Amino acid sequence: MLNEFKEFIARGNVMDLAVGVIIGAAFNKIVESVVNDLVMPVVGALTGGGFDFSNYFIALSGNVTATSLAAAREQGAVFAYGNFITVLINFLILAWIIFLMIKGVNRMRASLEKEKAAGAPEAATPPEDVQLLTEIRDLLKSQSRPAV
């Protein structure tokens, strides 16, 4: 069983997946920082300052009188849609960045394929004597076949 586990771990796909998950987690932190530290302050400045989605909620209980989400949750049930808006913005930014990365990779692949096509030598035509011998061979083959 231990040997099977070693073989499983040693496969390239598993290692690639592990690297992808680790890079994805680190990339998620970058996106969160972009949203929380760069995008949201600009949105706050454009909307009059002090704009913070994280404390947006709708009280589902009459007992909720707090103005912050943490305090409101202690008082009763709340519909906390502000966090959803923040997560949605994170997703859209991440999707946009991935789209731009894939677009760049596709553009790079296309240019590499163009370079390969331009640099590849065209099929050289055989010399005249080789062409003549090929024609003679094909003619002899066609004459040696019995008619059907």
Image (cartoon, grey):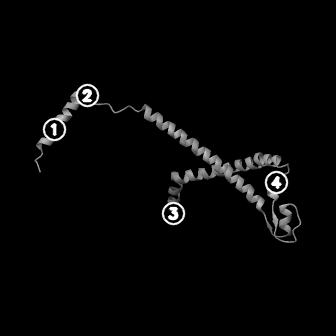
Q: Where is mark 4, residue-wise? A: 52
Where's residue 144, x and y in %?
11, 43
Q: Which residue is disc 3 drawn over?
A: 1
Tag 1, which secondary structure?
A: helix
* In contact (CB < 8 Å): disc 3 and disc 1: no
Residue 120, given in percent of the width and then of the height, sits at 41, 33
- Report the mark closest to the observer, 3 or 4: 4
Element type at mark 4: loop
* Residue at the image point whose x is 44% and y is 32% from the top: 118
Q: Are marks 4 and 2 in contact (CB under 8 Å)?
A: no
Look at mark 1 in the image and give the residue it sits on.
139
Q: Earlier in the sequence, mark 3 or mark 1?
A: 3
Residue 122 at what x, y percent from top left? 36, 32
In the visual, does 57 lie left or right of 113?
A: right
Question: Do callouts 4 and 1 mark residues in contact (Cβ within 8 Å)?
Answer: no
Are discs 2 and 1 less than 8 Å apart at CB? no
